[in-house]
């Protein structure tokens, strides 16, 4: 098991009182993560194409410090996500429209049995998307509130709370923060994928062993995965 991923995921096993509700979702994967853009966006190879994937139900917090800007906070949040997924095989779980108005895939992301969206919320690196209709919105909000209360992640810095500016809606956060992104005419286009290593049938990038607890998994959802 990756020590960094275990460090991020393990506290949830004891901290959460109950698993989120079960919902039926379509799942695709494994998808290979080639690059992490920020705490809620990544690039992944899916079916021979390089796709932009936007995490469903969460946003990178907008913390506009008058002196330091938001770069230090954005970098910390991106690095937390990168340690979880970059260079790993993931599964994408959909709940509603598969793509957003920019053409990005919008999904819950899994590494092995770890629910990445929830892990980032618990550790204080993302906020719940305001106005989101995602099935796990209340669950993400509960995790976010716990992170703020316990000063985890970004919320350990008093300035993060003081200068936090919630995004009004999830769509308001959809303008790409990636200067290298393939956004043309307001839409993100997929592209042919570069060489991607071939996964084993049940590969999860070695991040979480098959015997690891699946406490972060909504009940029943793992039955849809290989």
Image (cartoon, rainbow, N blue to C red):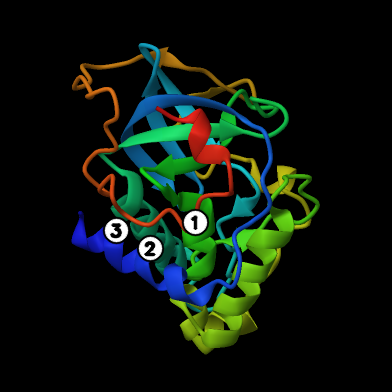
In front of the other: label 3 or label 1? 1
Q: Is residue 178 visible?
A: no
For this rendering, which residue is in front, 117 or 67? 117
Residue 202: name its quadrant.
top left
User: CA–CA distance between discs 2 and 1?
Assistant: 9 Å
Residue beneath the point at 26% across and 32% down: 203
Helix, strand, or loop for circle 3? helix
Mark 1: few/some/many CA within 10 Å (<14, 14-19, 20+) = many
Residue beneath the point at 65% across and 49% down: 57
Residue beneath the point at 46% across and 51% down: 116
Quarter of the image with the N terminus is: bottom left
Q: Position of residue 81 (x, y in %)?
A: 39, 54
- Name the N-terminal-most of marks 3 and 1: 3
Q: Which residue is mark 1?
A: 216
Q: Which residue is mark 3?
A: 5
Quarter of the image with the C terminus is: top left
Name the side, left or right, on which 112 lies relative to 150: left
Q: Position of residue 197 (x, y in %)?
A: 18, 22
Residue 11: name its quadrant.
bottom left
User: CA–CA distance between discs 3 and 1?
Assistant: 13 Å
């Amino acid at each position: 098991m990756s020590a960094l991923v275990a460090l991020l995921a393990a506290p949830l096993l004891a901290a959460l009182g109950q698993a989120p509700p079960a919902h039926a979702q379509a799942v695709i994967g494994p998808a290979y993560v080639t690059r992490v853009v920020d705490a809620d966006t990544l690039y992944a190879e899916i079916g021979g194409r390089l796709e932009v994937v936007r995490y469903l139900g969460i946003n990178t917090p907008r913390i506009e410090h008058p002196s330091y800007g938001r770069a230090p906070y954005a970098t910390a949040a991106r690095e937390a996500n990168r340690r979880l997924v970059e260079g790993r095989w993931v599964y994408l779980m959909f709940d509603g429209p598969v793509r957003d108005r920019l053409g990005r895939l919008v999904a819950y992301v899994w590494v092995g049995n770890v629910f990445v969206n929830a892990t980032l919320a618990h550790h204080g690196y993302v906020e719940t998307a305001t106005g989101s209709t995602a099935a796990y919105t209340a669950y993400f909000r509960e995790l976010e509130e716990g992170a703020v209360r316990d000063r985890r992640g970004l919320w350990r810095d008093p300035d993060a709370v003081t200068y936090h500016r919630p995004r009004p809606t999830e769509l308001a956060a959809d303008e790409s923060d990636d200067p290298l992104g393939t956004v043309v005419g307001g839409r993100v286009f997929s592209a042919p994928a570069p060489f991607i290593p071939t996964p084993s049938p049940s590969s999860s990038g070695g991040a979480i062993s098959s015997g690891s607890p699946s406490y972060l998994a909504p009940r029943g959802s793992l039955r849809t995965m290989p």
